[in-house]
Every structure is written in structure tokens, then in C-alpha cells.
Image (cartoon, grey):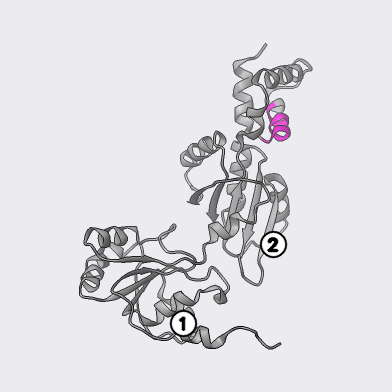
Amino acid sequence: MQSNLNLSYITKLLEHEKPQSGLYIVPTPVGNLSDITIRSLKILSSVDLIISEDTRVTKKLTSKYGIKSKIQSFHKFNSKNKIPGIIKKISSNFSVAVTTDSGTPLISDPGADLVKECFENNLSVFSLPGPSAPIASFVLATFQAENFTFRGFFPREKKKIESQLARFNGSDCPEIYFESPKRIIKTLNAILELSGDCKITFVRELTKKHEEIINTNISDLLEKISLKEKILGEITFIIEPIMSKITKLPEEEIIKFGNSLLNKGMNISEVSRLMSKDLSVSKRDIYQLLIKNRK
């Protein structure tokens, strides 16, 4: 099929011209290499230096598009040592582009200190719009929300998990997380235990050939992915605010219903589990409420 694109205009946009000296924050595709913007290609092909989290990943992109700019590593293990040299280069009229493995740099990636140093030294910083896994995943969620909180990678330590989910249980906006395939089932079980059977949007291998998008609740998602022999690929997930139902119901109604079940001979743990699933709230919150108001 013949393309109707104005290729001559695109070619003109890509014409090489030396960019202004400064730091360029350049987003790169989260999966599909075709998602890169024309401006990003132009900047990457014309800057004096590209600094990247993983040079191997960046070279796959630059090789595909025939970009010859010099590439150096810049990651959390060497960034502090490299910043003074980069600042010196930019101060000497160099143009430097910072990229990450995928998506927009500085989001759950190194680079914030470099941007800070640039501004403190009155050097120009340019932020290019482009691919972002949190934003691209958030718009796939089926629950309505006017805002969200991006948390980066889900915490690993038990105390941090409990603290984070305790804040989430009282919030009024969805939260977005990254997670590894190896840890996702453990993470989902922790959320189910501490925050109830809340709604979740699960996005795996975003924009890639085997992209998977599931809108469901935690328990159903666990059932589905537990059947897989192996979970592969990068994962982003969004969980819905938990406070929705428990705050919409008067507290006295929750206590009254809970006590009626207890008076029928059910133990408090069973009642908490049942009400947690029905109300989509934390089992722990129900348990503590009933203990405090047991009649």
C-alpha cells in the first residue's frame, strides 16, 4: 500500500544541524522501535555525545536508524563520577543527549543529579516529549480517575510494603508500579492480603509483539497468570484506590453487619476475609474495626 506521508517534509525535519549546547533529555521507545519521535532521531543523530543507561540497548536503536553519534555509559553505579566531566563538556559548548533503556529518562532512572548540576551551572536543559510506560499504561485502565501516583518499582522489604499499602488504602487516586516477572505473583499476593481484592490494570510487554493487557481484580489476575508456565517481559500495573467502598458505607453499617456474622458463629478472621472480598477493602482494616467494636 502506497503511503500518503509527506516524506519530503519528514526528510527536511531530519536534516542535520548542530543543536544548541546543553543537555537533551531524549525518550526512547518502550518496546516498538518505530515509536521514536522525529525530533528525538534528529537530536540523537546530531549531538556531540549520547549518554545512556545501557550502551548495548542504545546501540540497537542507533544502529537501526544509522545514527553515528558517540555513546558513553551513564548509570547509577558511575553517574556521580561522570557528572563533573559531562558538565565540563556542556560548559565547553558541547551538546549531550541522555537516554534510558526505554521510555523517558529520569523516571526510575539515574540523571536527576545531572539535571540539577546543569541548572546550578546555568546550562541549558531541554526535555523532549515521547514514550512513557506509566502514561501509556494508565490510559488503558478501565476505572475512571483524574489523577494518579507513580511509585516506580514495588518495594521488596516487608515493612516498606506495609507502609506503602497503608498509605494507599487511605488514598483517593490510583497508583502505578513497575514490577519484574519473577516477583509479580508475590507482589500481587501482598496487595491482596493488605489492601483487599482491588481492581487492577496489568500491562506486560507494552507495544511489543506479545503485548498483554488485563483489566480485572487482584484475585482473578493471580488465577490467570498462575496458570502460565513462565511469566516473561516488563510489567507495569495500576491499582485502583481502596478507600472507595469502605468510606462510602457508614462505619456503623460495617460494624453492624460484621457483628451479625460473628453472632451467627463465624470467627472474626472468616468474617474479615468475607467482608474484605465483598467490599474490596483490606482484610486487616475490617479485622481491626471489628475488634475495636466487638459486641
**Marker disc for residue 142:** none
Q: Where's residue 31, x and y in %?
A: 56, 70
Residue drawn at x 55%, y 73% is: 35
Give the residue displayed 31% in from the left and 61% down from the top: 115
Amino acid on which the number 2 mark rests in the picture: Glu
**Mark 1 is on which residue type?**
Leu
The tally of labels here is: 2
Judging by the rendered image, the residue that carries numbered circle 2 is 229
What is the chief secondary structure element of the magenta stretch? helix
Which stretch is magenta?
272-280
- Identify the residue position indicated by label 1 in the image: 13
Q: Is residue 279 magenta?
A: yes
Q: Secondary structure at mark 1?
A: helix
The residue at 46%/87% (across/down) is 66
Q: Quadrant of residue 100?
A: bottom left
Q: Which mark sits nearer the N-terminus, 2 or 1?
A: 1
Query: Where does the image place residue 268, in percent across and percent down from the top left?
Result: 68, 22
Residue 131 relative to residue 224: left or right: left
Rounded to the nearest angstrom, the CA distance separating label 2 from label 1 is 47 Å
Q: Does 137 appear above or below 54? A: above
- As rendered, which of 82 and 138 lies closer to the eye? 138
Residue 226 in the image: state x and y as whole percent.
69, 54
In reply to whether residue 31 is colored magenta, the answer given is no
* Quadrant including the C terminus: top right
* Depicted 251 relative to depicted 81: above or below: above
